[in-house]
Image (cartoon, rainbow, N blue to C red):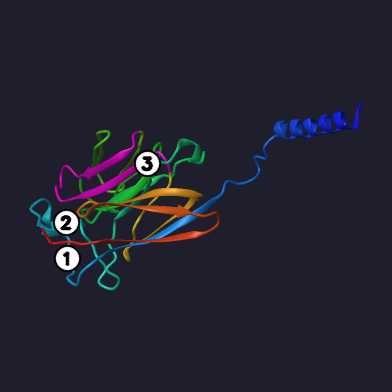
Amino acid sequence: MSLHTGFLVGVLAMLSCRVDEPRDSSIPAATGSIEGTVRLLGETLPEPTRVTNTTDPEACGREHTLQDLIVSPETRGIRYAIAALRDVPSAAIPPTEPKRVVIDNVGCQFSPHAVVARVGATLEALNSDPLLHTTHLYGPANINISLPVKGARSTRTLERPGTYAVRCDIHGWMQALIWVDPHPFHAVTDERGLFRIDGVPAGNHVLQVWHEKLGIQEKEVRVEDGVTTSVSIEYSYSGN
C-alpha cells in the first residue's frame, strides 16, 4: 500500500467513526429564562368593573368586582396578564408531566382569576363557600363542574388548547380564565405585573402577552443558554 493510499484509508476511517459515533443524550439541552414586566402607561389608575349583587347577598355581599383590570398603584404593573411563547415546535417541548392547576370558589369569587396550564393537565375545582357553586368552562371544550357544598372538589383533564372562560352559573359576576398551551412556556403576572418563564429552549421566540381587557401584544425574544432575558410590555388604556 502506498503512502498516499494509506493516508486516504486513514481519513475515511476517521470520518466513518465520526458519523457513526452516538450522540451523548446526557448533555442537557440549552435553555434560558424570560422575565418581564407588564405595565400600564399614563397617570390615572383604572379600577376593575364593579357590579351589584342580588344573588345570595347575605353570604356573598352586595358588591363585587370582575377582577378584569387590576393595576398596582406602586408599580403600575398589571395583574393577571398572560405571557406565553407562540408556535413552539413539538421537538422543543420537554417530556414532563403537566402540572395540576387549582381554581377555588372562595368569597363568591374564583381564586385565582387567571391560570395557565399545559394540555393534559388536571384541573381541580374546589368550593370553600357554604353555597352551591359551579365551575363552568366555556371555550375549546364545555366542562361544567357542580360543587354543591362547602369542601366539595372535583377534577377534570384539560385536553384541548385554547382560552377558557370560567363562570359560575349561580353567581353571574364570578369569572376566571384558563389559558391552555401544548407546552409549559407560559406564566401569569403577579400583583406587581411581573412574570418569569424558566427552561425556555435557547434561540429566537415570539412572546405573546394577553390581557382580557387590554388585548394582545407580541415581542421577539432571543434566549441564550443559562441567561435570563428581560422584557418590558406596556399598555395604554383609554377607559372605554
Q: Which of the two residues, 96 or 23, is positioned nearer the viewer here?
A: 23
> Which residue has dot 1 on it?
46
> Which residue has dot 2 on it?
60
Say whether residue 169 is visible. yes
Q: Which of the two residues, 101 or 182, is positioned nearer the viewer here?
A: 182
Q: Residues within 10 Å of mark 3 (few under 14, many from 20)?
A: many
Location of residue 240 in the rendering, given as x and y in whole percent from the top left corner: 10, 58
> Which residue has dot 3 on it?
181
* Relative to 143, residue 29 above or below: below
Q: Secondary structure at mark 1?
A: loop
Type of amino acid at the residue the image marks with label 1: Pro
* Relative to 65, residue 95 above or below: above
For marks 2 and 1 on the same chain, the one whose residue lies earlier in the sequence: 1
Type of amino acid at the residue the image marks with label 3: Asp
Q: Secondary structure at mark 3?
A: strand
Location of residue 44 in the rendering, given as x and y in whole percent from the top left corner: 17, 70
Q: CA distance from mark 3 to mark 1?
A: 30 Å
Q: Secondary structure at mark 2?
A: helix
Q: Between tags 2 and 1, which lies in front?
A: 1
- Asked which quadrant contains residue 148, the reply is top left
Magenta-colored stretch includes residue 170: yes
Q: Residues within 10 Å of mark 1 (few under 14, many from 20)?
A: some
For marks 3 and 1 on the same chain, the one whose residue lies earlier in the sequence: 1
Residue farthest to the right, as pictured: 1
